[in-house]
Image: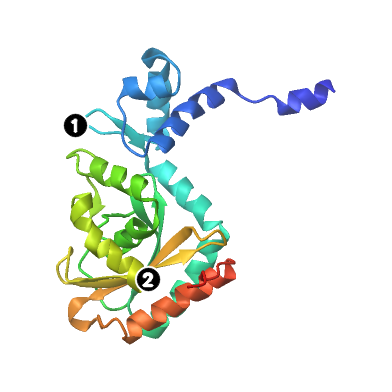
Amino acid sequence: MQNEEKERRGIQSIEVGGQLLAALADSGSAMTLKQLAETARMTPAKAHPYLVSFGKIGLVAQDPVSGRYGLGALALRMGIAGLRQLNPVRLGMAAAVALEQRIHHTVALSVWGNAGPTVIHLEESSHPIHMNLRPGTVMALTTATGMVFGAYLPAEKMQRFVEQSMHPQAFAQVVGALRSWPKMQPDLQEVRLRGMARVIGQPIPGVSAFAVPVFDHNGQVALVLTVIGPTGGFDPDWQGENARILKDVAGGISARLGFSEPNP
């Protein structure tokens, strides 16, 4: 019995520090030392040494201007690695390879992360796209990827996220333009009506895209599949090959995850 108890005994300081990481993960935005300490139920003096150590190994990053703390590069890599182990992501990655080979455009897989729609996998095409896109990139809700999340995730959650995003120091590395929640409603309604999102040369000039949701067995968005290409060589027709093949592929993944379309 004593040996069993010894095996279960952990390192208390790691467990204490983990409260800070959990607070950052749950927050979804950068926090001051005071806010972070209060959320983790400890004093700032106690929290600070943990944050220094976490910063050295990349679990936490401090903004040099605002002084606020957010999750660091290692935390992002760990999160992406964990997501890749989930079945929907594995299915999506396999589908992305086949999809790129069929339509010859870049294919991105995205999930909802702490900072919003986050690219977790990229299947690049030989057709160059003029945008800084890589795993870990956060997309604005005005992009095709973002609009799908905005249309299908809970409205209250999305409105709160948009309001936070409008803060000048909120998310400095987001790709795409910002727009108020009321002005987004017509576009989001069209996404729900068509079952997919489309952008043509905006909010990123010269880049067009289609994006579709992949649903799990509960009807929740598991990930978003996006086809991206240079506007001059991209078929934007709602009934065209890009849209049709992308929708079929996403529907196939959703079906394998146990999703079935509700009866009209």
Nearest the viewer among 169 and 125 is 169
**How are the colours assigned in the image?**
rainbow
Q: Which mark is residue 195?
A: 2
Which is more foreground, mark 1 or mark 2?
2
The residue identified by callout 1 is 65
Query: Relative to 77, does residue 221 appear above or below in the rendering?
Result: below
Please state the horizontal and vertical placement of residue 131, each as a whole percent of the image: 22, 64
Left or right position of 156 against 254:
left
Q: Is residue 124 visible?
A: no
Q: Residue at x 19, y 39 (%)?
A: 167
Query: Relative to 247, does residue 160 appear above or below in the rendering?
Result: above
Nearest the viewer among 126 and 148 is 148
Report crowding for label 2: few under 14, some 14 to 19, many 20 or more residues within 10 A (C-alpha): some
Q: Which mark is residue 85?
A: none
Left or right position of 138 against 46:
left
Please state the horizontal and vertical placement of residue 36, each as a whole percent of the image: 37, 25
Please state the horizontal and vertical placement of residue 241, each as a whole percent of the image: 34, 86
Query: Relative to 30, does residue 252 appear above or below in the rendering?
Result: below
Report crowding for label 1: few under 14, some 14 to 19, many 20 or more residues within 10 A (C-alpha): few
Q: Residue at x 40, y 77 (%)?
A: 246
Q: CA distance from mark 1 to mark 2?
A: 41 Å
Amino acid found under the numbered disc labelled 2: Gly
Amino acid found under the numbered disc labelled 1: Val
